[in-house]
Image (cartoon, rainbow, N blue to C red):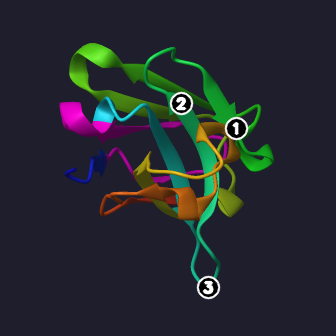
């Protein structure tokens, strides 16, 4: 499989919004589950949100619940992450990846995902 390509990262002020895009090949998209992860400087990569590309059902880690929304466009083989009310602690490199094997789409374990994209930088500061 070919890694997906992320885009949409930017520098914004606290309280702002961004929409990240994860464009995948049809094979990668149809693998069944794509997820968004992030890694801040000096910290480990953490799972944020994932989506079943067939049903559209989304799953969220606690840090992403309430302010972030994951969605997909099957016609475009693209998964989105809408991020609202951004905070400085959301500053990180955001990655998209496809589920390979393990605990399932909802568990958002980094080790269960592969075919990592290059990431897109989100910076939140005043």
Q: Which of marks 3 and 1 is nearer the N terminus?
A: 3
State how far apart marks 2 and 1 are (Cα). 9 Å
Q: Residue at x 34, y 18 (%)?
A: 73
- Which label number is shown at residue 60? 1
Does the magenta run of residues contain 89? no
Name the image quarter holding the C terminus.
Answer: bottom right
The one nearer the camera, 105 or 95, is 105
Q: What element carries label 2?
A: strand
How packed is label 2: few (under 14 Cα within 10 Å), some, or many (20 or more)? Answer: many
Q: Mark 3 points at which residue?
A: 42
* Residues shaded magenta: 7-28
Q: In this view, does 13 lie above or below 78?
A: below
Asked if the residue at tag 1 contacts the one at tag 2, i.e. Cβ–Cβ closer than 8 Å, the answer is: no
How packed is label 3: few (under 14 Cα within 10 Å), some, or many (20 or more)? Answer: few
Task: Locate residue 90 relative to residue 10 in the image: left or right.
Answer: right
Where residue 22 sits: x, y (%)? 34, 40
Where residue 64 sits: x, y (%)? 70, 43
Q: Which of marks 2 and 1 is nearer the N terminus?
A: 2
Where residue 7 sits: x, y (%)? 30, 47
Q: Residue at x 63, y 54 (%)?
A: 47
Where residue 117 sits: x, y (%)? 31, 58
């Amino acid at each position: 499989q070919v890694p997906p390509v992320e885009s949409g990262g930017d520098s914004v002020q606290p309280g702002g919004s961004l929409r990240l895009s994860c464009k995948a090949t049809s094979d990668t998209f149809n693998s069944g589950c794509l997820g968004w992860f992030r890694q801040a400087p000096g910290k480990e990569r953490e799972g944020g949100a994932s989506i079943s590309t067939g049903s559209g059902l989304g799953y969220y880690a606690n840090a992403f619940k309430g302010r972030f929304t994951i969605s997909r466009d099957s016609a475009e083989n693209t998964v989105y992450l809408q991020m609202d009310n951004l905070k400085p602690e959301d500053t990180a490199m955001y990655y998209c990846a496809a589920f390979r094997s393990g605990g399932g789409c909802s568990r958002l374990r980094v080790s269960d995902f592969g075919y990592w994209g290059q990431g897109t930088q989100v910076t939140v500061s005043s």
